[in-house]
Amino acid sequence: MRNLKRGPQVVLPKDLGMAVAFTGVGRRSTVVDAGTGSGFLAIALGNIAKSVITYERREEFAKLAERNVKASGLRNVKLKRKDIFKGMSERDVDLVTLDMADSEKVVKHAKKALKEGGYVVGFLPNMEQVKEFVRELERNKFSEVFTLECITREILVREQGVRPENTGLLHTVYLTFGRK
Amino acid sequence: MRNLKRGPQVVLPKDLGMAVAFTGVGRRSTVVDAGTGSGFLAIALGNIAKSVITYERREEFAKLAERNVKASGLRNVKLKRKDIFKGMSERDVDLVTLDMADSEKVVKHAKKALKEGGYVVGFLPNMEQVKEFVRELERNKFSEVFTLECITREILVREQGVRPENTGLLHTVYLTFGRK
Amino acid sequence: MRNLKRGPQVVLPKDLGMAVAFTGVGRRSTVVDAGTGSGFLAIALGNIAKSVITYERREEFAKLAERNVKASGLRNVKLKRKDIFKGMSERDVDLVTLDMADSEKVVKHAKKALKEGGYVVGFLPNMEQVKEFVRELERNKFSEVFTLECITREILVREQGVRPENTGLLHTVYLTFGRK
Amino acid sequence: MRNLKRGPQVVLPKDLGMAVAFTGVGRRSTVVDAGTGSGFLAIALGNIAKSVITYERREEFAKLAERNVKASGLRNVKLKRKDIFKGMSERDVDLVTLDMADSEKVVKHAKKALKEGGYVVGFLPNMEQVKEFVRELERNKFSEVFTLECITREILVREQGVRPENTGLLHTVYLTFGRK
């Protein structure tokens, strides 16, 4: 889980950690995730939550993710080959995670799927996306809307001296949260 | 879970998030935690893991924590009024979290309690503690020893403009990880 | 010069430092500054540059700044009670610093005032201002357009342990640079 | 002056900026610098200060620096092929900058060279060096002892979206200041 070098295309552990810590997702939670991509986020959440349903409409990613889910040994992660822009059938969900382009268009569907008190989280690379996502959360009457960024540094502890690593990740995504 | 303003005495959500993301603790995990303090970390982990045993020898904190655990409704968090410096009886543990002074003295006990592949995490305010903790991990042949710090900023998204909050937390703890 | 606690309304030393380091302003430079405010930036630059002309149209700030300039003992800082939105008469200037609302409207005047190779720097609290400022720099054919932010932490070095300060400044302004 | 990618071996603009901003060095200042290295810091300060004397005992660096100083066109930067551990002959100096191994051993010489109110600044990669440098400043009765670190991020402003650069510098040096 530790690889900080994987590049910004995949949700990184630090951002997964923020999503977990600030939504309180746990072993009794039901999660809907979109889009699946390689499945890293769905699998990481599958390790924590009771069940994860993850949406992916692109066949090549769906295949890759299915392989990764199988390799993980997790049986509580289910992949749906569906277009989440058309809505999700799940209800009483504790958490909806959105790591995809145009994720603000899924906010209204997330509102329906979530239980009272449930959270939606957007993983948003750009400022403009944050603004749009927040606007959509407000339009759909989410409460506790907030946005975080997380900068993680490795500290090198060596005989010759302790210091932060010289180069590394400065930015991956902003995380925007809303609560139903 | 969201309060970033609680001050540095309690493990904060951002640091809990790091500990979860970089150890892979999940719904099937057994955790030993020390010292309990107010119980925030034990409760947050109790929400995720199968079971949490938390050590606290100071009676006033033990009482406070018991009240907080009860209020949380979690039945998988058990408090032990014992001195963890004398060792822990648990075995085959997935994660040991140490948020206490002189935590490096517990590393050898953690080694015994952990299963192969399990993690110990120290929450360490100062550089000197990091060095001592790392030295003790190496002495006890832990692998994958690494140290992180996490800086989290809230981004204010307002009609008049998007920007990070002006003031806030710059430092809480360093997190040092080791794997058995 | 050291007070990190002054709040975000005044240009802070860290941001002055960025402006100096990334424009190469020095003892032979001529600077135009707007708006003066309390005069901190004009005085700090007056300590470095050959001459500083600073524009302030609001009488109460002009008075305050004149008092501060006098107290500094600097004779190379001149205050103009003029509206910089109407243009500046200076030519062959090395650096134009803009710490004011609607500073993007001054970019075209800065272009005229600067010598070839000279820099304009905007001190911009919000993302939206950065975008507008950059757009205006590009419209006016500035080259080497870039934007920085600078996060400074004090490190506490004490007998009981070395660590960053717990709370402090997370954001003041973005600095946007352009070169003629 | 802008190249953030040069790696941590040379003083970078951001750290030069901190040194300038927090010491108030300006066009009337006299500076002693050691060790010269490639001469970047001496040249950058030579652009600002009245005069800079820079110490370098390693012949290959002295040659390189002399070439760089010549290329800069600055006539107020003088290189001394001397061992600064044996002391400096300059007096009434406004600023001493130390970017070299074992710089804490030069603190007592800096004390003699500085005028009342003058600053010494150490550029220190590791925590242990910071501690030693601070200890030596205290032993030599410097006042206003403080240590800073500066994290600079470039913000990418593009049609497709505004966001910080993904990777870059996380650490170069800590800056430790003391005032006579």
Image (tube, coloured by chain):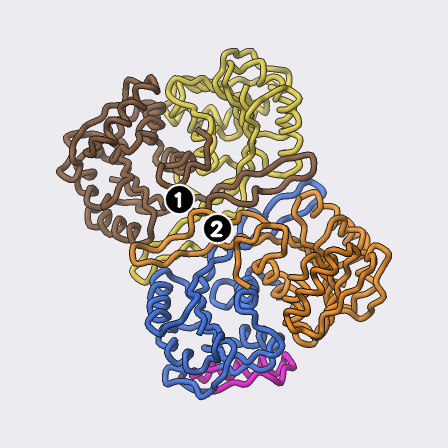
Chain colours: A orange, B blue, C yellow, D brown
State the image coordinates of residue B75 (x, y, percent, origin top left).
Answer: 62, 85
- Residue in the foreground of this view, choosing between D12 and C80: D12
**Quarter of the image with the C terminus of chain A in it:** bottom right
In this picture, residue A63 sits left or right of residue C154: right
Q: Residue furthest left?
A: D86
Residue D168 among magenta residues: no
Residue C52 in the image, given as x and y percentages of width and height:
45, 19
Judging depth in this view, the residue of D107 and D43 nearest the camera is: D43
Chain on which label 1 sits? D
Q: Is residue C142 above or below residue B180?
A: above
| Whether residue A144 can be seen here | no
Q: Amino acid at mark 2?
A: Gly
Q: Residue at x 61, y 15 (%)?
A: C87
Residue placed most toward the observer, B102 or C70: B102
Tell me the kind of residue under disc 1.
Answer: Thr
Measured as percent of width and height from the top left, residue A163 is found at 37, 53
Horizontal and vertical percent position of residue C117: 50, 18
The magenta-colored residue range is B55-80
Q: What label sits on residue D172 in the rendered view?
A: 1
For residue B37, above or below residue D149: below
In space, the residues marked 2 and 1 are separated at their CA atoms by: 21 Å
Please tell me whether mark 2 sits on a helix, a strand or a loop.
strand
Q: Is residue B60 magenta?
A: yes
Q: Is residue A43 visible?
A: yes
Q: Secondary structure at mark 1?
A: loop
The residue indicated by pointer 2 is C168
Mark 2, other Cα within 10 Å: few <14 / some 14–19 / many ≥20:
some
Q: Can you tell which of label 2 and label 1 is closer to the viewer?
A: 1
Q: Are marks 2 and 1 on the same chain?
A: no
Which quadrant is home to the N terminus of chain A?
bottom right
